[in-house]
Image (cartoon, rainbow, N blue to C red):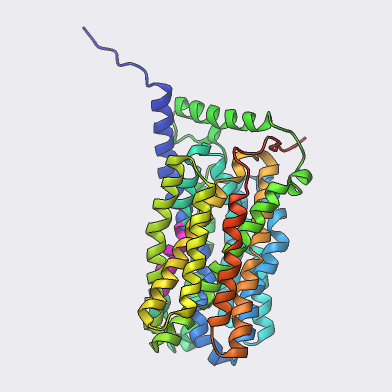
Amino acid sequence: MVRVSAAPSEAQLASSAARKVSRRLLPFLFVLYIVAYLDRINVGFAQLQMKGALGFGDSVYGLGTGIFFIGYFLFEVPSNLILARTGARLWIARIMITWGLISASMAFVQTPASFYALRFLLGVAEAGFFPGIIYYLGSWFPEEQRASVVSRFMTAVPIAGVIGGPLSGALFTLDGTAGLAGWQWIFLAEGLPSVVLGIAVLFYLTDRVEDAHWLSPAERAVLGTRIRMEEQQIAARGHVGVLRALLHPTVWRLSLLLFPLVVGLYGITFWLPQIIQGFSGLGNVAVATVSAIPYLTAVVVMVVFGAHSDRTGERRLHLAVAALAGAVGMALSASARSPGAVLAALSLSAAGILSANPIVWALPTTFLTGSAAAGAIGLINSFANLGGFVGPYLIGRVHDATGSFTASLLAIAALLLCTPVLALSLRRPPPADALQASDG
């Protein structure tokens, strides 16, 4: 007698589809975000040599690093709305190719004006990348998996720090090669790969579940049905246009609670090498290498934290605890006196701040969908990323005035305390007046 194997159950098909989607999309998107973040933060390592070579003070450097976020803010929402219309494949490719070319052009900065201009244009070019990926992941993964998925994707941020330090240190050793300084090699070597990967996006990404020929027809049907059912449940709670989504109080509350996290994140990111050099007295190559330690700590913590949030289904308390850890670490880094204590405090702060971010991004798609989701996610990210201007500029101005990082680190720690308060004020369950885009 020939045995006929039973057809896979719906649960088995859903599990199989989830594994295939994770294997297909997450590693590739992870690499894209590493490259994106390297091109955003490499100025933090380059400044160890660049400021002296070009005669830039801390205020010039702080303004130049921060002005990136002004361009980012102005073009974030329009970029994400375009992505929702054109699809992720075409628009993410455009973003990566343009930012890669601009980032590489940073190697030829000569004056403060050219520094400001290229940093502003880099923000314009990159606008829409991160929120576009968040929106894209929401169309492939059910809600109960998103904190873990976003946590794994966002480990690219600390991994970029882990890679960026030693890589920048190695590139410093090319100083003088082909008539270029080490800081120029950092921008060239870390910018041009974005162009290559942008071209690869056109051939690799799939815009919709229905077009995923790397899934079986049954897997496409089950996954597509789950995503559509979630969207229909959200739609049943309300149906408004994009403009009203942008004005919704929950969207603005998420923007406000994310703002301090971004201030803290980029305060650390752009000034970490100089802070480490200040308390250790190490050379440029050693500083770039040691700066990987806080990011290594954050990689482990944020993955565990995001997975625990998914298992428990709890978001608000996880977000509040992580943000509080970030604030405590920042305050301790300002008051610590030994190099080991400062590095440990910065590691705690980085782990807390970076663990809080994925929890924030698991929340919008629980009450948003369609173009309302794309526009609101873009707004949350663009407003919050103004903190990327405030953090570096604040530290630069205060350091120029006082010769110390203490006051600015304490100010950022105080600001970070706003996030736990706002997180605990979020409504649970998701608001009944949830939003659905009116695309017609």
- What residue is drawn where x is 23% and y is 10%? 2
Question: Residue at coordinates 39% horizontally, 51% vertically from top-left?
Answer: 304
Please state the extent of the stretch shown in magenta in the rendering. Answer: 155-166
Residue 164, magenta (yes or no): yes
Expressed as whole percent of the image width and height from the top left, the position of residue 317 reads 51, 49
| Closest to the observer, 29 or 328 | 328
- x then y, percent, for residue 301: 40, 57
Image quarter in which the N terminus is found: top left
- Residue at position x 56%, y 51% in the image: 360
Pick whichever, 137 or 377, lies toward us. 377
Q: Identify whether 41 is placed above or below 242.
A: below
Q: Could you say which quadrant of the image residue 170 lies in?
A: bottom left
Residue 23 placement, left or right of 119: left
226 up-or-down from 176: above or below:
above
Q: Residue at x 45, y 59 (%)?
A: 156
Q: Is residue 146 magenta?
A: no
Residue 345, image x, y percentages: 42, 72
- Is 243 placed left or right of 335 in the picture? right
Quadrant occupied by the C terminus: top right
- Is residue 167 something that shows in the picture? no
Q: Is residue 309 left or right of residue 3?
A: right
As rendered, which of 57 and 188 lies closer to the eye? Answer: 57
Residue 434 in the image: above or below residue 114: above
Q: How many marks?
A: 0
Q: Position of residue 216 (x, y in %)?
A: 44, 29
Please name the predominant secondary structure of the magenta segment in the image.
helix
- Name which quarter of the figure residue 368 lies in: top right
Residue occupying the far top of the picture: 1
